[in-house]
Image (spheres, grey):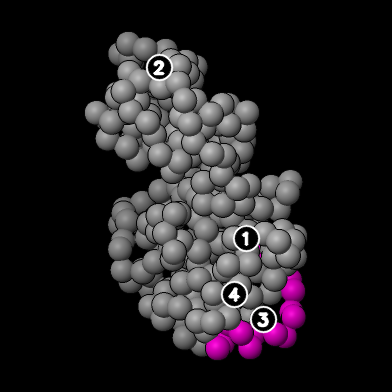
Amino acid sequence: MDLAELGAFLRSRRDRIRPADVGLPTGPRRRVPGLRRDEVAHLAGASVDYYIELERGAAQPSEQMIAALARALRLTRDERDHLYHLAGRPLPSPGGPAAHVHPGMLDLLDRLTGTPAQVITDLHVTLVQNRLAVALFGPAPAPDTPGASLAWRWFTDPASRNVYPAEDHAYQSRQLVADLRAAVGRRGAKDPEAVAMVSGLRAASEEFAELWDRYDVAVRRADRKRIVHPRLGVVDVNCLNLFSEDGRQRLLWFTPAVGTESAARLELLGVLGTQDLVPEHS
């Protein structure tokens, strides 16, 4: 662990990033070529005072904070790993909630300003959302909590299903389980995260156990969804996917379905802002 070196490394990465690279406005009176400390803190979900302590080498960041900083500063995988080493923290599992998100995927997410979009893992844990995704679905649960995965919430928390019309629940259950089986197959029988999720869901939900025993498998590459928003009503969207090379992450973006009123309703998202009546889903 070398916290002084960690602080210097953070400063060097902050100085190289332009505000436009991370979707921030470029004002005419900026005193620094890169990001300000408060901007990095905002992007990482940390307080400004805490981030200043990190750059001073006076604090040891948690694994979750390192992951957030890596995304905020658009670090490569090698740079992110270096940050973990400097902080004296173990590297996270490739498909876990602190998994590295490729800077190119984050850059694409930043550019999708006119449509809801988010990056999730193959076990349906949301890693990052854009502003419109938060406005449509609400903020995602913290990735290190038991209910971080939509798959877990869907079969253990009835309220999580309110995001879909009741008549769509059975279809969504089947699709979710089939996609999850494909992910577990890619990861292998010894992957601890996947094994724990499946065994936990089999014990907690008879519906999941029954669907799992059907052995249906189908990667969810594209889908049409009806989203129930508390203020917009039902929004018909097409859900499209861009997968990482190893299949452990996907960028989802949602476009209005042709022939519906969803285009006008999605335009209202930026005006309505975030809502907190339903959990995030994918």
Give the CA separation, mark 4 to mark 3: 11 Å
Near mark 3 (Cα within 10 A), the count class, few <14, some 14-19 or many ≥20, is some
Q: Is residue 214 magenta?
A: yes
Which quarter of the picture shows residue 182? bottom right
Whether the residues at callouts 4 and 3 have beta carbons within 8 Å, the answer is: no
Relative to 185, is 68 on the left or the right? left
> What span is in magenta?
206-222
Residue ID at (36%, 69%) = 278
Label 1 sits on a secondary structure element that is helix
Q: In x, y percent, where is residue 151?
A: 54, 70
Residue annotated with mark 4: 199
- Residue 117 makes an appearance in the image: no
Disc on the earlier residue, 4 or 3? 4
Residue annotated with mark 2: 4
Give the CA separation, mark 2 to mark 4: 43 Å
Mark 2 or 3: the one toward you? 2
Q: In x, y percent, where is residue 165?
A: 46, 81
Mark 3 or 1: the one toward you? 1
Label 4 sits on a secondary structure element that is helix
Residue ID at (50%, 64%) = 149
Residue 212's disc number: 3
Kind of residue at disc 4: Ser
Label 2 sits on a secondary structure element that is helix
Front position in the image: 235 or 86: 86
Residue 192's disc number: 1
Disc on the earlier residue, 2 or 3? 2
Give the CA separation, mark 2 to mark 1: 34 Å
Q: Is residue 27 above or below residue 134?
A: above
Whether the residues at callouts 2 and 3 have beta carbons within 8 Å, the answer is: no
